[in-house]
Amino acid sequence: MRVTRETMPVRRSTALQLLTLLCLLVLSSFVQGADAPVQSPNDRNDYRLVTLDNELRVLLVSAPGSEKAAASLNVRVGSGDDPVEREGLAHFLEHMLFLGTEKYPEPGEYQQFIKSHGGEHNAFTAFQDTNYFFDIQADQLEDALDRFAQQFSAPLFTAELVERERRAVHSEYTAKIQEDGRRFYSARKQALNPAHASSQYAVGNLTTLEDTEERPLRPDLVRFWQQHYSANLMTLVVYGPQSLDQLEAMIRPRFSAIENHALPPRDHTAPLFAAGQLPARLDVEALRDIRNLTLSFPIPSQRDLYPTKPASYVANLLGHEGPGSLLDVLKNHGWVESLSAGAGTDTGVEATLEIGMDLTPQGMAHQNEIIGLTFTYIDKVREEGISEDRFKEMQQLADIGFRFKERQDPINEVTRLSMELAEVAPRDVLQAPWMMADYDPDGYRNVLEQLSPDNVLISVLAQTPLAEDAPRTPWYDTAYTLTALDSEQLAALSVPETLSQQLAMPEPNPFIPEDLSLVSGETMKQPEPLATNTNLALWYARDTRFDTPKANIYLSLRSPIARSSARNTVLTTLYVDAINDGLNAWAYPARLAGLNYSVYPHLRGVTIRVGGYSDKLHSLLSRILIQLAHPELSEQRFNIARRNLLDDLRNKAQARPVEQTSEYVQTTLLEGAWSVEDRLAAAERLSFDDLKEFAGHFINQLDPVMLAHGNLTKASALNITHQAEALLLQDSEAVTVPRSGVRRLPDGETDVSLEVQHPDTGYTLYLQGDNNGYPERASFRLLGQIISGPFYEEIRTQRQLGYIVYATSFEMLDTPALGLVVQSPEAEPEAIDQAVREFTADFIVRLDNMDEAMLDREKQAVISTLLDQDRKLSDASNRFWQEIDRDNAQFDTREQLAEAITKISHEQLMATYRNALEKRQRALRATTSRQPQDNAALTSTLTERQAVPNS
């Protein structure tokens, strides 16, 4: 049945509706001209701001040539609106809106429509917002919007689905019950003012969403929707290649049907912290071996100050990582591993500024000195940090960033913009994140005045056990203590003079680009090899089609020793850590100036990636090459990095069950990958001398390859090659390091059970293809597309086996496979497997009855994703780099796959389904148990097998 509100909209005649629509189209065009959003000069889209007659605000984005369309609707209602007696109700409503409408009553119809046309959909509930979004093939936008709009104008809230979906919400809660982030925030809520809605539990579970005869849930749900969801609290962004007039014609009749109750958004006027609550210290017991220290300062809301961003100005200085920064001093002293500063919660009335740090074990023993030095640095910012020259530098970087803003994935863009539209002036919706309009010294001082010892919550999340009688949080059962502090004692904390004297404000940024011109010449379709007269293979492609003076350079140092043992894999990781640690302070200004870099280990060795404005890219790359050739090794850093690695490996035992089952599949089957246990054992035995010896040998034998792509001339690419040769490669012996493969599973099903101490059961069924040829890969990708929606609907929605449920292509290194994944709070492994087998047996009937039109639709969905256009330079760079990694000089993998998909017959698809899913011809089933398991012999057998053949 349809749910109606207490007041119904007036029905209009068809003629009157058409006349009104024409008038409004003319009016909206007029309004758009006066209130058009400010665009980046590099933005090729067209925009129109529209306010419907029900006060729903809309931003239309016409993106000519886009193959994807997307939409996002943001409702200015969130968990902060939950009734005290119904915590989690806003989140539950988010779930229920997807499950059938007056026009499309089938619960999974919307989801299947989106999935079958190459799209994705999702939603999230935040404190003051609930956001719904999707993307889809562009020619299906209108039909998708028809379904999407119905969710807000005519949801059914089918009574039979209430019980099912409250269990889904409960499964979402239990799936993340052991995540330390959730546990920490459950404790932090205990430190907030209980009169503030932020102190409430937000997710929901079977208790808070109780559904009994005495207390039925559905009436509360419907009442909440009627009393909180209103068109005037909604902002919609629609993105597609259609013209603005076409987009407006799509949305007006559909979204005007949403009722407007002229509701005001809720004002959270109670203070986040009650009078006298601060200063205070919150200690929270973690499950994983982590050490986080956070200083949270309540400050006035910054929402209306987005044009000048005073809090961002202050946070930019506090979170700086260059020489003399707070992080640089503490990190060099061996106390802190990382630091961030920025805005936290902002309710529109009040906000927080957060300074967060990851401590080393030594830092845990010196928390008072760290806190004291933090306040010393805040004082230094007050005294020396407010400078118009510094503001102008930030403003210049923001202006350059907006001027050369790159296109983003449509689904991400519409989600961001629908939330921006709810908070900023319409003309600023595109430029708001980059605005630094005016120098605002008073605003900076106002923020800094709040960063004082009498106005801080100091939080520590660590594995250190608290007292047995420590209070525990509701729902997450997390031990914590909350202690009042003395502000005078905080202000008087002892700070080592040797450290405070090292603190300094940032120097002028030397990496700000000066030459922003584009090189001449047409964009090259794909990279071409250039002769270098060295052992370095160079691929070059000039590319200025995105009108940005940017380039990306990749250099892979393939080494035969990197993957030869678990020990060398660990040493490669520690070697890379030493390089990144030596670069961080020097290179941080480069990041601020629009350059980026990454040095990371992989199966074949180490890769360097540098990107951003091409003007000063060579300077950044030179420094990285010098670090690689002559890393700054120190025993203090080695001990910290080794401890971090040990913590990370041990903490994997606390990951979600399905993360552990999937990791087992990957580390067991990937050649050159090593298990967590092997890496842990190797790391425990390593010494600093081992790292020094390894670093001295790593570049002795290399198989190097480079990609230079973007705003670069051929001459500059060759110069970069010569630079790499001179600084790093001239003494290296040329070798060949082959690409890893994926080990072929034995015939039949292989079962493994992993010990995981988590209340949920994890289940991963990995179904491997016969070979790596294009036809086999195409069949598995198409099967993954076809079964993903029905598998989710059956296992998650109908059977309610868990919140984390999906079927997907599980392709590793071009080896085709399917992955069926379930995490269940109630079912045992065999019950999950039985449900999967029943789904497999039932679905073959549907697959057998699939007609040619349906099959073509699913093929097109896969192909549209596969051939998704490059929207920015990094999209193309990453694609080219993957082709170089697989030694495909034609750069046509996706085209070959797309062609293979078009050729798949119904008979071929049925054969693949029967072999892979029905017979489990080559399958690995990994599940979890809370009992000890011994899988050594099985794992050893699997790791000795040969790779899957190429064809």
Image (cartoon, helix red, strand yellow):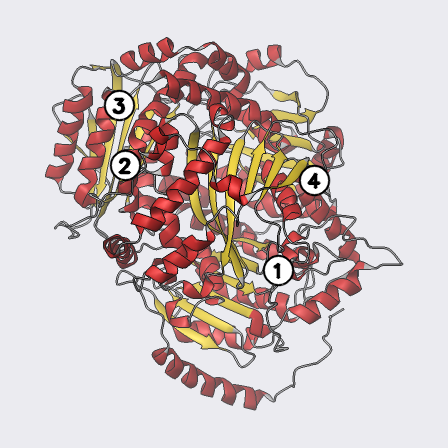
Going by the numbered disc 4, the residue's amino acid type is: Tyr
Do tag 3 and tag 1 residues touch (Cβ < 8 Å)?
Answer: no
User: Residue 690 location, x and y as percent?
Assistant: 37, 9
Inspect this view and state whether residue 498 appears. yes
SS label for mark 4: loop
Quarter of the image with the N terminus in it: bottom right
Q: Earlier in the sequence, mark 2 or mark 3?
A: 2
Instruction: Give the labeled residue for mark 3.
Output: 628
Category of crowding for the residue at label 1, using alpha-carbon neighbours closer than 10 angstroms: few (below 14), some (14–19), many (at least 20): many
Do tag 2 and tag 3 residues touch (Cβ < 8 Å)?
Answer: no
SS label for mark 2: helix
Instruction: Give the labeled residue for mark 2.
Output: 587
Q: Earlier in the sequence, mark 3 or mark 4?
A: 4
Q: Earlier in the sequence, mark 1 or mark 4?
A: 1
User: Residue 220 location, x and y as percent?
Assistant: 77, 63
Q: Is residue 951 left or right of residue 460?
A: left
Please tell me which residue is depicted at 18% across the width and 37% down the height of the picture.
618
- Label 1 to label 4: alpha-carbon separation: 21 Å
Q: Is residue 862 left or right of residue 716?
A: right
Q: Is residue 123 above or below residue 425?
A: above
Do tag 1 and tag 2 residues touch (Cβ < 8 Å)?
Answer: no
